[in-house]
Amino acid sequence: MGINTGLRISNIIALKVEDVMNKTHVLIKLVKTGKPLYFCLNDNVILELKKYIGANKLTLDDYLFTSKKRDQFSNKKPIQRIQAHYIMKDIEKEFKILHFGCHSMRKTFGYHFYKKEKDIVTLMKIFGHSSQGVTLRYIGIDQDEIDKKLSTFHL
C-alpha cells in the first residue's frame, strides 16, 4: 500500500477492509491534516489486496493491518505506528537496507513516480506539499541530480 499509493503510515494503518474492498478509488480523511484525500488504487494493489484479505480471512469491519490486541468490546484493533516501525526495522535487517522505515515507502513512491512520469506538479499535489522544491528535496532528486552530474564531471 505505501509504495503504491504514497500514503503516510498513519493513514495506511487506519484503513479498514471496507475502505478498499472492490474499489478502484478510496476517499479518506488524512490523519496529519484532517483534509480529505481521494486516491486511486492501481490494478496491482487491487489484486494484492484481494489476495491479502482472503489469505488473512479479514471481514469488511476489520482493519487491513490488525493487531493481536482487542478493544473493550473484543473488536480487533489496527497495528500502531510503533508496530509498523518494528516491522520495517525487521525488513531493514533482513534485506540489509540502510535507513529503511515507514516513511521510506512514501518517499520511494514519490521518487519512482517522478522518475517515470516527470510530473512534479501532480506529485506535489499527491503529497500536499506547498512547492515543487520541497517535493524534489523530499524525494531526494536534488541529491540524485548532483551525484549524477558530479560523477561525470572532470577537470
Image (cartoon, rainbow, N blue to C red):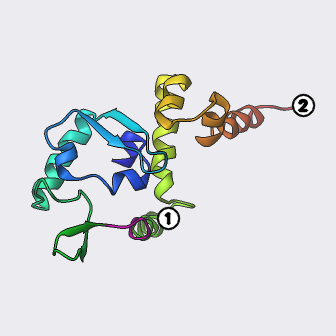
Please check the rendered image and state whether residue 80 is part of the magenta-colored stretch, yes or no.
yes
Q: Which mark is residue 155?
A: 2
| Residue at the (43%, 71%) spot, across then down | 86
| Residue at the (34%, 33%) spot, across then down | 38
Q: Which residues fall within the magenta stretch?
A: 79-84
| Residue at the (33%, 57%) spot, across then down | 13
Q: Which mark is residue 3?
A: none
Choose the circle earlier in sequence order: 2 or 1: 1
x%, y% of residue 97?
Answer: 51, 60
Judged by depth in the image, the label closer to the viewer, 2 or 1, is 1
Q: Main secondary structure of the magenta part?
A: helix
Dot 2: element: loop
Dot 1: element: loop
Please check the rendered image and state whether residue 31 is part of the magenta-colored stretch, yes or no.
no
Residue 83 occupies quadrant: bottom left
Q: Pointer 2: residues within 10 angstroms few (<14), some, or many (20+)? A: few
Q: Which residue does the numbered mark 1 point to in the structure image?
A: 96
| Residue at the (45%, 66%) spot, across then down | 85
